Amino acid sequence: AQSVDQPDAHVTLYEGASLELRCSYSYSAAPYLFWYVQYPGQSLQFLLKYITGDAVVKGTKGFEAEFRKSNSSFNLKKSPAHWSDSAKYFCALEGLRGGSNYKLTFGKGTLITVTP
Amino acid sequence: DTTVKQNPRYKLARVGKPVNLICSQTMNHDTMYWYQKKPNQAPKLLLFYYDKILNREADTFEKFQSSRPNNSFCSLYIGSAGLEYSAMYLCASSKGTAWEQYFGPGTRLTVL
């Protein structure tokens, strides 16, 4: 079984502050980890992923995430935050669902509000 | 073009009636997915096609059907809608495992 937890449902911060979104996962093998973002009125969009290699991965729009196997986390960071970063962010894990098929399991998402 | 399209964007259905949702992509992706998303919940995988092979999740196996007449199109079919089917239905496509998924705008289904 696999699961993803995003403990913060809503985070509010001021523009210019540092943004960090928490994500923890449960999976018995090496995970493929993703962050997706949904801006208001738009579709879910891919932000970045960790497959293997360097623990810190960089994505679009100045975001980066750090994979920590020791505590099963994949936190998303950006500094400084901009008002345009206001969106809902989803952490996801791709793991085996049976046989050779994989599935993406999402967290519930964290809504970020950046105030100017 | 990395767009995934979904039709209709909004669908109103009566309890007990069938529902058919459509998705298309022109990226020549092997895999197409359907997710169900309810407010304040994580998107939940319902089923996916890898090429012409349909894979359905065990807990929704009997509730949803799908077809993929060609590489570009994929449908989601509900034979008899219940109130619990009211949700946003998201279609996505990808090249395969470990590749990012491209999502459509979703179809908001309301069952009355």
Image: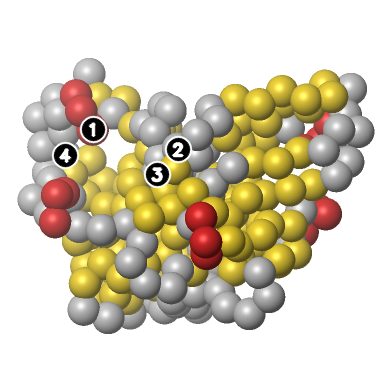
Please tell me which residue is depicted at 76% across the width and 38% down the height of the picture: A19
What's the mark number on residue A108?
2
Q: Is residue B8 above or below residue B6?
A: above
Q: How far apart in space, not on screen, are marks 3 and 4 (Cα)?
A: 22 Å
- Crowding at dot 1, Cα within 10 Å, few <14 / some 14-19 / many 20+, comes out as some
- Crowding at dot 4, Cα within 10 Å, few <14 / some 14-19 / many 20+, comes out as few
Quarter of the rendering containing residue A26:
bottom left
Give the residue pinned by disc 1. B85
Describe residue B50's horizontal placement relative to residue A107 as left or right: left
**Badge 4 element:** loop
Please tell me which residue is depicted at 16% across the width and 39% down the height of the picture: B18
Report the chain holding disc 4: B
Give the residue pinned by disc 3. B43
Q: How far apart in space, not on screen, are marks 1 and 2 (Cα)?
A: 19 Å
Report the mark closest to the observer, 1 or 3.
Answer: 3
Do pointers 2 and 3 mark residues of a single chain? Answer: no
**Badge 2 element:** loop
Report the mark closest to the observer, 2 or 4.
Answer: 2
Where the N terminus of chain A falls, by quadrant? bottom left
Give the residue pinned by disc 4. B18
Q: How far apart in space, not on screen, are marks 2 and 4 (Cα)?
A: 29 Å
**Among numbered discs 3 and 4, the one appearing first in the sequence:** 4
Report the chain holding disc 3: B
> Can residue B72 be seen in the rendering of this structure?
no
| Amino acid type, label 2 | Lys
Report the mark closest to the observer, 3 or 4.
Answer: 3
